[in-house]
Amino acid sequence: MFDTTPYENRFEAAVGHFEEELKKVRTGRAHPDMLDGVMVMAYGAQMPLRQVASVTAPEADQILVTPFDPANIQDIALAIRNDLALGFNPSDDGRNVRVPIPPLTEETRREIVKNLGDKAENTRVQLRNVREEARKAIKVLTSVSDDEKKRLEKGIDDSVAKFNARIDEIFKAKEAEIMKI
């Protein structure tokens, strides 16, 4: 019998990755996940920011980064400043790095939504690729009838449709959050 579980797990992983990517997207409000992609040169190696500092959002327009080791404060500020995709200009007071979050303009909001659309489409492409792999695996089965093959393909197609609907739902919610002033 053909097991669709590995394909379902890959569909779930693709959508989960999409959700994680959306957490990093700026929405006009400060959120600690906005700095998840920042890599800091500390102790002679590139390390994720969360491994060298505590990241919080005490206010709606500011992120506070508290290094575990105050010797890394300059490196942390530099790493945030050098991440051009973020466009943040952090300042440090000797103990903490404060990252002010500038308000989003209408044009910036539209650009962010456009980029989200691209990420959603990339996730849909991943789903289609997994579906094609599943279909190829089903076609080469010799131990099942043609009717059973059609039923299996329909099940895979239904799963893809379900996950595509979830992508649309997640995208629309994030779009509304971004466009809200």
Image (spheres, rainbow, N blue to C red):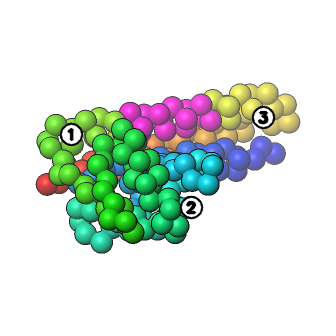
Q: Which residue is mark 2?
A: 51
Earlier in the chain: of badge 3 and badge 2, it is: 2
In the image, residue 37 lies in the stretch drawn in magenta: no
How many other residues sit within 10 Å of disc 1, few (<14), some (14-19) or many (≥20)?
A: some
Residue occupying the point 80% across, 37% down: 144
Q: Which mark is residue 108?
A: 1
Q: Is residue 122 magenta?
A: yes
Quick one: SS at disc 3? loop
- Does residue 150 appear in this view? no
Earlier in the chain: of badge 1 and badge 3, it is 1
Above or below, 117 against 21 in this view is: above
Instruction: Give the amino acid type for the residue marked by disc 2 in the picture.
Output: Gln
Say which of 57 and 142 sits in front.
Answer: 57
Q: Nearer the viewer, mark 1 or mark 3?
A: 1
Q: Position of residue 54 (x, y in %)?
A: 46, 68
Toward the right, the furthest residue is 143
Badge 2 marks a residue whose secondary structure is helix
Q: Amino acid at mark 3?
A: Ser
Question: Is residue 157 visible from the viewing direction of this image?
Answer: yes
Q: Say above or below: 84 vs 179.
A: above
- Image quarter in which the C terminus is found: bottom left
Residue at 75%, 32% (x, y): give it: 137
Residue at the outermost bottom position: 58
